[in-house]
Image: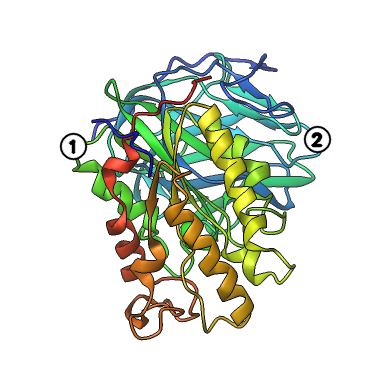
């Protein structure tokens, strides 16, 4: 490894300004060509406190409301959200957007629900392929808060953008009920997040974030839904009490995701800029991908995957951030496993452990494997399909991360 390591408050009300505007495009720091963020400019003091990778979902519908439940990591003031239309084929207007603290189910803590604006306007129209960043909402947001973002679109149509496997129950309504504290009109449940892809806050000076770039294991499949037991959630709990600068955690896993090819979402290479490097306040990228490339049986070799890892490392370093690489976990017993895949997995893991190209390494293979058959997950960690860890396995993964490796001092050129 390279030696690069150093070292319930209430949401305040926002002045409500009437009228809708088409926000002026603003390119956030690091945004790739073709991915434009409209709305207020990015503030370099902001740090991501929650994130979910954008993907193409089914067709959207007009006059529908979404009450989206998310769980924050780092505390801070001046909440901002990002609404994504990255996979839309036409503009979408959001005419009412609110944020408040959850009481239970779809019900909010009375008085906590406040309107978000976009350059002072209540409404924002997001072009196809773009996203919108809200104005800061005054007030302090504690860590580990169940925050509810309620959005309504009068004209949504065509492909929706969102995150399909949330492992969290959210709610929908017909019509605009975003300003309501009660759950009366929010009777339909969904297991996905629509349009919302980022929450950021302004924490204490020097605080930073880590982004977990991964597949269904990072996305939390086989962890208990609605209890925030994905391994990045357990990591966030550890970071809250640790004496490190990294406190924010964004989970950018997508089920079925691959490093090299599109399939379960766009490939890690293709979505790196939008889902990871455009997030505010990121110090470290935690890369845990590769198993889906192997089990797809497309002829991917160890050298193919290594080339993909190297490109990610190079791009992250060019953005002035560090990269922690995680070894590919065992999956013998999964229907697509075969000895040829296992051989490639071994070669790839040797590269991750020994190449020195990552700033640090977390050995998830060593953490999860059975001592009696190292090609299999230890039964006590197995979620039942021999690929995805259960809650105990997720916690073991988070416990295996050296927190000082996330708090690294990057020596790479910053953008």
Q: Is residue 74 left or right of residue 256?
A: left
Residue beneath the point at 66% across and 37% down: 153
Q: Is residue 375 left or right of residue 20?
A: left
Mark 2 and mark 1 in contact? Answer it, CB < 8 Å. no
**What secondary structure is found at the residue carrying circle 1?**
loop
Position of residue 353 measured from the top left corner of the image (x, y, whole percent): 42, 56
Q: Judge whether residue 376 can be spotted in this image.
A: yes
Q: Which residue is mark 2?
A: 90
Q: Which residue is mark 1?
A: 243
Q: Residues within 10 Å of mark 2 (few under 14, many from 20)?
A: some
Q: Nearer the viewer, residue 350 or 370?
A: 350
Q: Nearer the viewer, residue 334 or 47?
A: 334
Residue beneath the point at 34% across and 67% down: 367
Q: Quadrant of the N terminus?
A: top left
Q: Residue furthest front?
A: 355
Foreground disc of the pair 2, 1? 1
Above or below: residue 29 compared with residue 142: above
Above or below: residue 290 compared with residue 131: below
Above or below: residue 203 compared with residue 234: above
Q: Nearer the viewer, residue 404 or 252?
A: 404
Q: What whole-number distance in Å separates the C-alpha atoms at marks 2 and 1?
A: 46 Å
Q: Is residue 50 left or right of residue 39?
A: left
Above or below: residue 244 compared with residue 367: above
Residue beneath the point at 45% across and 44% down: 358
Q: Nearer the viewer, residue 292 or 34?
A: 292
The disc at residue 69 is none
Residue beneath the point at 32% across and 42% down: 405
Position of residue 198 measured from the top left corner of the image (x, y, whole percent): 51, 36
User: Can you tell which quarter of the image residue 65 is in?
Assistant: top right
**What secondary structure is found at the residue carrying circle 2?**
loop
User: Can you tell which quarter of the image residue 324 is in?
Assistant: top left
Position of residue 235 measured from the top left corner of the image (x, y, whole percent): 32, 51
């Amino acid at each position: 490894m390279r030696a690069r390591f150093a070292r319930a408050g209430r949401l305040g009300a926002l002045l409500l300004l009437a009228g809708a505007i088409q926000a002026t495009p603003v390119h956030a720091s690091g945004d790739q060509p073709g991915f434009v963020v409209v709305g207020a400019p990015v503030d370099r003091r902001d740090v991501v406190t929650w994130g979910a990778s954008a993907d193409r979902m089914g067709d959207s519908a007009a006059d529908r409301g979404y009450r989206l439940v998310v769980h924050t990591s780092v505390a801070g003031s001046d909440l901002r959200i990002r609404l994504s239309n990255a996979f839309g084929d036409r503009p979408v207007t959001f005419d009412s957007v609110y944020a408040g603290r959850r009481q239970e189910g779809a019900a909010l803590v009375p008085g906590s629900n406040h309107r978000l604006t976009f350059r002072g306007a209540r409404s924002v129209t997001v072009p196809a392929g773009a996203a919108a960043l809200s104005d800061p909402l005054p007030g302090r947001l504690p860590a580990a808060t169940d925050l509810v973002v309620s959005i309504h679109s009068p004209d949504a149509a065509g492909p929706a953008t969102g995150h399909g496997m949330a492992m969290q129950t959210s709610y929908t309504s017909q019509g605009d009920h975003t300003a309501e504290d009660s759950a009366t009109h929010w009777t339909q449940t969904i297991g996905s997040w629509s349009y919302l892809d980022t929450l950021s806050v302004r924490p204490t000076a020097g605080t930073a974030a880590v982004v977990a770039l991964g597949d269904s294991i990072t996305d939390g499949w086989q962890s208990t839904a609605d209890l925030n037991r994905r391994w990045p959630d357990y990591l966030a709990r550890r970071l809250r009490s640790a004496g490190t600068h990294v406190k924010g955690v964004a989970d950018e896993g997508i089920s079925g995701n691959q490093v090299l090819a599109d399939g379960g979402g766009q490939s890690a290479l293709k979505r790196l800029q939008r889902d990871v490097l455009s997030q505010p306040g990121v110090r470290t990228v935690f890369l845990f991908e590769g198993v889906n490339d192997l089990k797809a049986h497309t002829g991917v070799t160890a050298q193919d995957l290594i080339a993909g890892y190297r490109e990610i490392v190079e791009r992250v370093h060019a953005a002035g951030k560090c990269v922690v690489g995680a070894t590919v976990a065992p999956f013998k017993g999964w229907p697509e496993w075969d000895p040829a895949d296992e051989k490639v997995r071994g070669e790839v893991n040797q590269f991750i452990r020994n190449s020195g190209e990552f700033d640090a390494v977390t050995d998830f293979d060593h953490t999860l494997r059975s001592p009696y058959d190292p090609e299999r997950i230890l039964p006590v960690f197995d979620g039942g399909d021999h690929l995805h860890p259960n809650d105990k396995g997720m916690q073991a993964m988070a416990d295996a991360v050296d927190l000082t490796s996330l708090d690294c001092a990057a020596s790479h050129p910053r953008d």
